[in-house]
Image: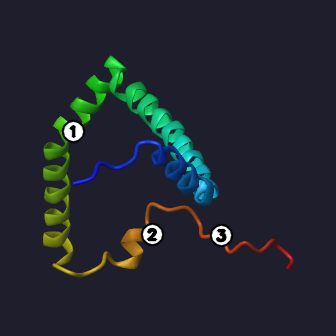
């Protein structure tokens, strides 16, 4: 078995790089842009995760979600009992607490 000639490797690599130079340049540019975006993303994640107050507040908010969802469910159940399932509030009741309707027209138009 014959060993490959080491002297021909540089020429082969040079030929390969020469024919694909434009493509390699695009790959390097794309990789550079990807790395910049990745660094920005990591910084943004670190800003959120690294802020102890924000972490504490976020954990508290997530911890309160089951209670909030339960209260929302109770409210909807109460509304269904009051108005019947699948029915809308009567228009006069829904509008009772709203101010006068505005049509967007000015007087005299």
- Decide: few, some or many residues near mark 3? Use Cα within 10 Å; few <14, some 14-19, many ≥20: few
N-term-proximal mark, 2 vs 1 = 1
Image quadrant of residue 63?
top left
Rendered-image quadrant of the C terminus: bottom right
Q: Nearer the viewer, mark 1 or mark 3?
A: 1
Q: Percent x, y for residue 75?
A: 19, 58
Left or right: 42 with respect to 103?
left
Residue plotted at (59% across, 66% down): 100
Residue 104 % position (x, y)? 72, 72
Left or right relative to 31: residue 81: left
- In the image, which disc is placed on residue 95? 2
- Residue 102's label in the rendered image is 3
Q: CA distance from mark 1 to mark 3?
A: 39 Å
- Asked if residue 64 is positioned above or below residue 107 in the image, the reply reads above
User: Which residue is located at x 47 percent, y 43 percent?
Assistant: 7
Disc 3 is placed on an element classified as loop
Which residue is outermost to the right? 108
Q: Badge 1 local density, few (<14 within 10 Å), some, or many (20+)?
A: few
Nearer to me, 51 or 20: 20
Q: Dot 1 corresponds to which residue?
A: 62
- The residue under the point 20% across, 46% down is 68
User: Between marks 2 and 1, how big is the CA–CA gap?
Assistant: 34 Å
Mark 3 and mark 2 in contact (Cβ < 8 Å)? no
Return the disc, 1 or 3, that comes first in the chain's sequence.
1
Left or right relative to 5: residue 85: left
Residue at 27% from the left image edge and 52% from the top image edge = 2
Q: Position of residue 98 (x, y in %)?
A: 50, 62
Mark earlier in primary sequence (2, 3): 2
């Amino acid at each position: 078995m014959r060993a490959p000639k080491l002297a021909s490797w540089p020429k082969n690599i040079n030929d390969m790089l020469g024919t694909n130079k434009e493509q390699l340049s695009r790959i390097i540019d794309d990789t550079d842009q990807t790395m910049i975006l990745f660094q920005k993303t990591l910084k943004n994640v670190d800003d959120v995760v690294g802020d102890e107050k924000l972490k504490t507040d976020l954990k508290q908010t997530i911890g309160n979600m089951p209670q909030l969802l339960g209260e929302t469910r109770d409210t909807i159940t109460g509304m269904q009992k009051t108005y019947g399932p699948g029915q809308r509030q009567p228009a006069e009741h829904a509008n009772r607490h709203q101010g006068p309707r505005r049509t967007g027209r000015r007087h005299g138009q």
